Amino acid sequence: MRRMALLLLLGGWPGLSAAVERLRVEVLEVLPHDARAFTQGLLLHEGRFYESTGRYGHSSLREVDPASGEVLRRRELDPAWFGEGLARVDDRLIQLTWREGLALSYRLDDFRLLGVYQYGGEGWGLCYDGESLWMSDGSATLYRRDPADFSLRGRVTVRLDGAPQERLNELACVGEHVYANIWHEPRLVRIDKPSGRVSAEIDASALVAASRRGDDREAVLNGIAHDAASGDFYLTGKLWPEMFRVRFVASSAVAD
Ligand SMILES: [Ca+2]
């Protein structure tokens, strides 16, 4: 009977979701990051960061050396385009734009523009899970798109404890989950696919406290890359001079 009550408390009742895990970041390493990069998209591939930066007249696609933060390759966007989320699909990179309704497809090895897809609404975050692209637009909706032609395959509302989780921004696809950081909050969520249920909340306020960013109000946490080899994550922010290599641990865990 007591066990039944506990199950109910934990959300075992049909229709209710299980308890949301509470996690926090543990910093493993602090690396340099270009403090002029208004980071909008970030991923790691074969030991290099690929980064999309935003703001009109400053938007770019970059290949970055993780250890030094040095920009190894850089392609500027048309000044009328505001760079947003970035995903790798095999030997291509796909970069969103904010309000331009254009997704730019590049060859990974030389950043040559291969094509442009059009979509409705705003573009914020993007990641690829090996089958579909997942895209955010600042709302609580994630859009699932075809990597071949960017057509819409489906959409899901992301919910935390049953309530829509708005302002989903940068994304990372990791296994059965999509990680998202929340715009203007020191917080990430881990989203179960395809239900959209938030199964973990991740407190990243330690990074916000540690960053020596300037006083630009838009210099907020943004940018999630996952290292499949180590399982570590890399987090940064818009105009942040730091890139943090982290792992996610239970929020009750005592720091070393
Ligand atoms: Ca990302």
Image: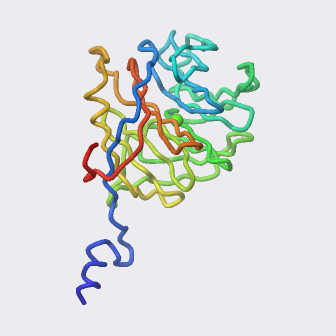
Q: Is residue 85 left or right of residue 93?
A: left
Q: Quadrant of residue 120?
A: top right
- Residue at (37% x, 44% y) in the render: 166
How far across and how far down the image is residue 60, in percent?
57, 16
Judging depth in this view, the residue of 66 and 50 nearest the camera is 66
Residue, far bottom: 1
Judging depth in this view, the residue of 96 and 177 nearest the camera is 177
How far across and how far down the image is residue 209, in percent?
25, 28
How far across and how far down the image is residue 108, in percent?
72, 26
> How many marks do you count on the picture?
0
- Residue at (68% x, 31% y) in the render: 117
Q: Is residue 12 above or below residue 204?
A: below
Q: Is residue 71 above or below residue 256?
A: above
- Residue at (59% x, 53% y) in the render: 154
Q: Is residue 72 left or right of residue 110?
A: left
How far across and how far down the image is residue 21, in percent?
34, 58
Judging depth in this view, the residue of 65 and 2 nearest the camera is 65
Judging depth in this view, the residue of 80 and 10 nearest the camera is 10
Q: Quadrant of residue 256?
A: top left
Colour style of the rendered protein structure: rainbow
Q: Is residue 70 left or right of residue 208?
A: right
Q: Is residue 5 above or below residue 90?
A: below
Q: Is residue 79 above or below residue 151?
A: above
Quadrant of the image containing the N terminus? bottom left
